[in-house]
Image: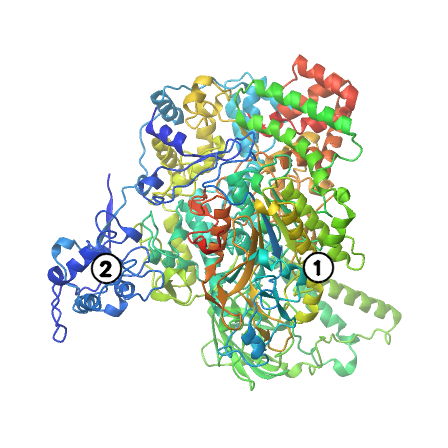
Amino acid sequence: MTPFLNRRHFLTQATTGLSSIALASLLDQQRLLADAAPIRPNIDPAKPFAARDTHHPAAAKNVLVIFCAGACSQIDTFDYKPELIKRHGQPMPGAESLVTFQGEQGMLTKSPWEFKPRGESGKMISELVPQLAELADDMCFIHSLTGKTNTHGPGENFMSTGYTLDGFPSMGAWATWALGTENENLPAYVAIADPRGTPQSSVNNWGPGFLPAAFQGTEFSALKPLDNLGIPPGVSAKTDRATRSFLERMNQRHLEQFPGDSELAARISSYQLAARMQLSVPEVTDLSSEPQSILREYGADDSQNTLKAQFAKNCILARRLIENGVRFVQLFNGAYQTGGEGVSNWDGHKSLQQQYSKHGPVLDQPCAALLRDMKRRGLLKDTLVVWMTEFGRMPTFQKGASGRDHNPDGFTAWMMGAGVKAPFTYGATDEFGYKAAENISTVYDFHATILHLLGLNHKQLTYYHNGFERRLTDVHGHVIQEILA
Amino acid sequence: MNIKRNISNQRLPVLLFAVVLACEVQAVDFKQDIEPIFHAHCIDCHGSDEQESQFRLDRLATMLSGGNSGEPAVVPGKPDESFLLKLIRHEEPGKEMPPGESLSKGEIELIEQWIAGGAKIPESYGPAKTEVDLSHWAFQPVKRSQASGIDEFVRNTLTANGLKQSPAAERRVLIRRLYLVMLGIPPTPHQVEAFVTDESEGAWQTLLERVLASSHYGERWATYWLDLVRFGETHGFEMNRERPTAWQYRDWVIQSFNDDKPYNEFVRQQIAGDTLGAEVATGFLVAGPVDQVKGSDPKLRQAQRMNELDDMINTTGTAFLGLTTGCARCHNHKFDPISQRDYYSMQAVFAGVQHGDRSLPPSPETKQQIATLDAEIAELTGRLKKFIAEDESKLRPSVNARQNEEVFEKREVRFIRFTIQKTTGGDGCIDELEVYAEGSNVALASSGAKATSSGDFVHPKHKLMHINDGRHGNDRSWIVDSAKGGWVQIELAAPAIIDRVVWGRDRDGQFADRLPIEYRIESALEAGKWELLVSSADREVYSGSKPSEPEYQFAKFPAEEAVQGEKWLMRLQAARDEKKELEKSTLVYAGTFSQPGPTHRLYRGEPDAKREQVAPNAIEVFTSLNLSSDAPERDRRLSLANWVASTDNPLTARVIVNRLWQFHFGIGIVDTPSDFGLNGTPPSHPELLDWMASELMEHDWSLKHVHRLILNSDTWRQSNRPNADAVRVDATSRLLWRFPPRRLEAEAIRDSVLAVTGVLDLQNAGGPGFSPFEVEMENVRHYHAKKTFGPADWRRMIYMTKVRQEREQVFGAFDCPDASMVVPKRSRSTTPLQALNLLNSEFVMQQADLFAKRLEKESDTRPQQITRAWQLCFQRAPTDEELADSEAFIQQEGIQQFTRAMLNANEFVFIP
């Protein structure tokens, strides 16, 4: 045997099917990876979603991302700035010539919502989200995130994929590629879009990028079923079963000519898995078994605010998915279909008070109920909840408008549940909430930390594509040790 | 052979070892004062054992050139420009050196004095110039070894591994394989029978030539190329709007493959087709995504532009050269000899390329049609004159914010000047000034015309270069610097006989302010000798945004004449519409070109960290394009194109034959197909790769020649059956002891479904694509999967409009890329969602139904129908067992369920 084959055997990059891309041992020879040799998940083509080993013991098994699309203002929610209240109506020092996304700045403007101390920790949170605020003692805040773009699409790309450009794998795709899932009868990775539609960067937020398509987020919600899941109209369940079994006999006879061919075998098992999904997905999306008390707590029965009721159903679905072992769930609040610029998302440029007065109640009760419910059921022991948005907003109002422009220089995210300290606050923005000033963190750090909590080393979780060893964190990122429990 | 080339360090002062007059600087002795500091604090990580950041302090050459950062560490005589000092003074956040400690103030001063004194150093530190090691296999010239052909190379490697080739595959398998690999659709039962029963000696060659001559070959192989160049028909990013004229590049690729255009020409045209008579080909440069949302923040806007250029640099590098040029954006390439300076030299090559539609010179045919229409319009306008209400008959309509056409007697001119005398308010604005000679706009900067003005209003959206950049709209307009007026002037590349000037304020129709309403247009053949061409004097007074058409009054004429007049008017309007349509059809998304400003190297790739200016160039260790910093834009791309496509380039031919091999066998000889650099994997059959590369070049870069070599080999024609012993040694069949079976790609599965059900529309090839989506035409586009399908959707998938980010609802799940990124090799995954899509989607269910109908129409009995289905789908007859099972199944569940299962079968979606 040639050394060539030895190397291949040793360094085959496992993916599903037969496609395996060799990674040269040259990498090691050249010491690129001296301290971070890639760890390739060992994927059985016949069971691409089987649970796989972590790099180190994991604090969290699952992740629930709550993504507020449109750039939810830290100034009006979680980042309390007494100095901003004091200097309300005055110019922001140094902002005279500052040009942000839409243009020039007006005056410093305090939030229209009052901040109050919450829980035992006394964390100051605004009245915009009163029910979420009551969970302050369970939250771990990062107030010092910094991004690289002030445009929505690239901002969402950055938060969900680690790159501002299109085409990179989403965080959930990385996680499921590495770890598979606990319940193979459900998709490993589910994206629940807002009842109003998709976020600005749409499917990029849950795309597979260059990872195998198997690890793409599957999109469905309490309102919108999974595409092509149901048996076609006019076909009975019995006939459908008979057809699948006829197909399997055909495929088995074909396989006899190719004993041991994993790609052919994988395709046969994918049909079996699909059949199981046809049973388990409708079961998990069927909320009729939820008691009235739960519907009420989430606000799913709110006949006054149908949007809230719809989002509440998505929240219940998110819990059911996590409960059933789905590895990665992304729950979106805010969409672009029914109007940009804050009409149906958090992009409050023009009339922030009016717009957020609509969005706050839609988010608050359902989301708070979801978190309380997960806590009650013990799901937060294994699940990391991450609340995020594409970037922050300015402490000033825009010149000639009553809303805030984009601000990637200092914004807030919070985590809850498995592996993180709570109550805890990490990092801070300056006196106005404009720029990160203390423990400045990057989105790369944020991603490195999430992967770390899942038991993955962000430097070793790499995939070779078009000449590059790619990672979620590019060539950056440090785990934020301070927030780890 | 070990090739080494000297590269000169351009920053290196010649006077390095010259005597430096250091009257005020106390002489510092390197050996005594400096070396001990380096040895105590630096050399562990930057010496002979380790070279962190590829930087070492025990060599003069690397001290001068610096490490990965691209910054010269030591600039003799210039402490302030020496990166080393910045780092030890802790002036670079995150790069404080030495890590975790500080040199003493005295030590830093000593180093500073040493540099100020000329950085004198003993000869033992080696020469100032680096010798770049180019011994890496892919950087050496292609070397042809003697061999009878592909099989010899493959068998040698097999033998060395104790393996041997499999026997030849049977003919039914071969023809299925050939059609699927080369054309992406299965052969018809008739074609199969003809081949299987052809007893002539040249049966295979005859078949092969027929397949290579098929226009479906280009349709199949263009898919691979379009993946490789991230071709999409929307812009991507959040708005993801359409690029309705981009399909022409897709057709150009298909046509190029079908014509067997020499590959070197294919390459050159994509980089510089505008100078090579292949305008559409430059669609390559701008095939990638572009963010249409530009913020006001100048730094972030600049970063967006850098990303656009990076996409061009990186795609050119990976697609043609198999080099990851994009890696050198922020620092020197970590593995390959590509410096950051090289990267920015390549950026200078593309710096004049902008995303957008380019208006193509009309074809002679179109030109003729436009001229005919012009004549007709003039004729009708003349005839209609008598119907114009009298008091207005002498005046032309008032100016119009969108577009104004000024027609005059033909005359020869070199200069055209547009003088703004009065506007609707503010400084006058013009988005484009076009000057026509024989139907072509000769004022374009890309045709060599130069624009000057009396003064420009300064704004990123409004620039002098916009006046003749071929792009319309407010964002691409020019504004004069004074509300009192001023002029803009075009100097043509050569004198031309012109008869028309067209100008507008905003052809997108968004803006009507700053509109020049009093103006004159003059021309000159010799500089300064102006003659008036036209002016606003004979126009009606501007009264608002609506252009005033002359009012025709037919009523006062006799009925017959009035009817005639009305007919003429209708025809006039129709002729104008036809003309507009003809002019529109010459737009193509192939980028626009304008002379760029200076390009600088950017420290850490950050737009606000400009370093030295660079001239347009390629990779220094391989070549020099010998261009000056202000070389004309098109020369830059043409020079680069010529180097990429030259037979001396060690990479280009190797990279493309490897790609062909990969698409035949599923895996390349180099299985990192877009990285032939030091970080790529070594070839499994290096001599074979070189042999094919030299075959390609010696046969006028004919890709079909390489296909023939491959298709005629025993290696390609062997059986695909597994063999337990061989699997143990080489499970992935990389050494080709069999033909490696694999699943078809999304496009070939969809096309195969349509082919066997009998509805595939092969006639409707080329032209605008069909969409798999209902598009919600919001500011930000939303794409909803179509739910019903008809014949318009049954063209080949290559003609499906390629929407970025959104994967087609059924076949997208089969690893079909979304065109956000360059894809040299698709992943091949197997998922339950694929199964659900192929089993349950409306699309496939409709096809299953059509398939059932076809079978029942074409054959009478169940066994015949089953046999026919097998032949259509698998190119063979069913076994007795298969026939019996099928018959029983159809009896129970009906023939639609049978066809549904057939379209889902493994055998159907695999290349045998």
Q: Which of the labelled discs sits on residue B313, or is there none?
A: none
User: Where in the figure is residue A307, as x and y percent of width and height?
Assistant: 74, 57
Q: Secondary structure at mark 2?
A: helix
- The chain ID associated with circle 2 is B
Count how many numbered circles sit on residues in the image: 2
Tag 2 and tag 1 share a subunit: no
Q: Are marks 2 and 1 in contact (CB under 8 Å)?
A: no
Residue B540 left/right relative to A152: right
- For badge 2, the amino acid type reads Leu
Q: Quadrant of residue A467?
A: top left
Residue B387 left/right relative to A120: right
- How packed mark 2 is, by other alpha carbons closer than 10 Å (few <14, some 14-19, many 20 or more), is many
- How packed mark 1 is, by other alpha carbons closer than 10 Å (few <14, some 14-19, many 20 or more), is many
Q: Secondary structure at mark 1?
A: helix
Query: In the rendered image of this protein, does residue B447 appear above or below residue A88?
Result: above
User: Where in the figure is residue B43, as x and y percent of width and height?
Assistant: 21, 53
Q: Which of A363/A246 is in front?
A: A363
Q: Which of A68/B480 is in front?
A: A68
Quadrant, the C terminus of chain B:
top right
**Residue receiving disc 1:** A362
Q: Which of the labelled discs sits on residue B64, or is there none?
A: 2
- For badge 1, the amino acid type reads Val
Q: Quadrant of residue A289?
A: top right
User: Where in the figure is residue B115, as x and y percent of width and height?
Assistant: 19, 66
Q: Residue at x 71, y 29 (%)?
A: B900
* Residue at far top of view: B880
